[in-house]
Amino acid sequence: MLRPFQLLAFFLISSFGLFSCTSEDETSLTDSDISTDAESFFDLSYGSHPQQTYDIYLPAGRSSLSTKVIVLVHGGAWVSGDKSEMNNIVDFLQQDHPDHAIVNINYVLATQNTPAFPNQFADLEAVVNTLTSEAEQFQILPIFGFIGVSAGAHLSMMYDYVYDIDDQVKFVANIVGPTDLTDPFYTADPDYEATIAFYVDETQYPNTTNYAQAVSPAYNVSFACSPTVMFYGNQDMTVPLSNGELLDQRLSEEMITHSFTIYDGGHGDDWSETDWNNVALQIGEYINSYLIIE
């Protein structure tokens, strides 16, 4: 039933292996008076569902006046995956951006009884609201940059483009994210209508809604979108290059700052080490430009 969107599962763990990972002792948040030493807290809750959890990595010397936050959002076709798949990028961010807090999130995975949309958009909103309410406790400034991969990139863009009313998100890094669920690549599937019905809670939208467009970032671009850095493969059989090309066009029409890089290969798993180093470099430039620590 989930063909072809089921193919959107994120299998890029090995590709991110070029960012070496270090192990840390798990810590639980039990005291409201966090010191300004570097600390990490794991599996904190932002909601009542067991999957509504996040890890937070807090830098030494942080301040609620300046320490901005990088949020990582995993892929998995909206039905699978876990924040642990993004752990390999944490060490890279801590080394190259040591003054930023890092948050690695889970969200409630879609099932037959729990559609992805808009529930997963609401999960990202709940994460932002939780971090905002706890900013003084964590000694962070609730200003965010989002880095998402595949389905996680889709969620990150949708949150910024539609739900970030207070403009707390300052950039989005979109790594092979689906942007247009009306693309012929998807609509050619004989199970397309059933697949959209599986993913979308239609009761949460007006009954005249084009549901596929309503949950597609490319159809939700406006002047309010944040700068977006985009990465796609020219032979991707999971998220077609046409998805990146349409978003590039829509962002250009709205004069939104963005960049669009195309690599030889598919959904990231076969990109070269040079390509992934370039991804890291460009994301770093967006962090330094739009999430600057002042």
Image: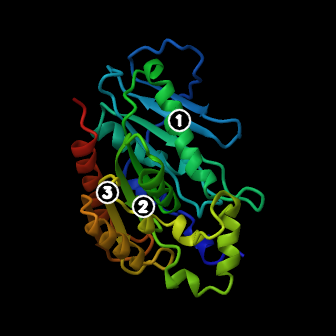
Task: Find residue 55 and name its label.
Answer: 1
Question: Which residue is rendered at x = 52% and y = 61% of the image?
Answer: 151
User: If you read the primary sequence from the N terminus, does the residue marked by circle 3 or circle 2 appear first?
Assistant: 2
User: If you read the primary sequence from the N terminus, does the residue marked by circle 1 or circle 2 appear first?
Assistant: 2
Question: Could you tell me if the residues under marks 3 and 1 are in contact, i.e. CB atoms within 8 Å?
Answer: no
Observer-side mark, 3 or 1, equals 3
In the rendered view of the protein, which quadrant contains the N terminus? bottom right
Q: Position of residue 268 (x, y in %)?
A: 42, 68
Task: Assign a secondary structure to mark 3.
Answer: loop
In the rendered view of the protein, which quadrant contains the C terminus? top left
Task: Find residue 278 and name its label.
Answer: none
Q: What is the CA distance from the residue labelled 3 to the residue labelled 2?
A: 33 Å
Q: Amino acid at mark 1?
A: Asp
Question: Could you tell me if the residues under marks 3 and 2 are in contact, i.e. CB atoms within 8 Å?
Answer: no
Looking at the picture, does residue 251 appear above or below residue 128?
Answer: below
Name the residue tied to disc 2.
15
Left or right of 259? Residue 14 is right
| Quarter where residue 76 is shown | bottom right
Left or right of 30? Residue 143 is left
Task: Assign a secondary structure to mark 1.
Answer: strand
Task: Find residue 223 and name its label.
Answer: 3
Q: Amino acid at mark 3?
A: Phe
Question: Could you tell me if the residues under marks 1 and 2 are in contact, i.e. CB atoms within 8 Å?
Answer: no
Q: Is residue 276 visible?
A: no
| Quarter where residue 53 is shown | top right
Q: What is the CA distance from the residue labelled 1 to the residue labelled 2?
A: 22 Å
Q: Position of residue 61 (x, y in %)?
A: 32, 19
Left or right of 194? Residue 247 is left
User: If you read the primary sequence from the N terminus, does the residue marked by circle 3 or circle 1 appear first?
Assistant: 1
Observer-side mark, 1 or 2, equals 1
Q: Amino acid at mark 2?
A: Ser
Q: Residues within 10 Å of mark 1 (few under 14, many from 20)?
A: many
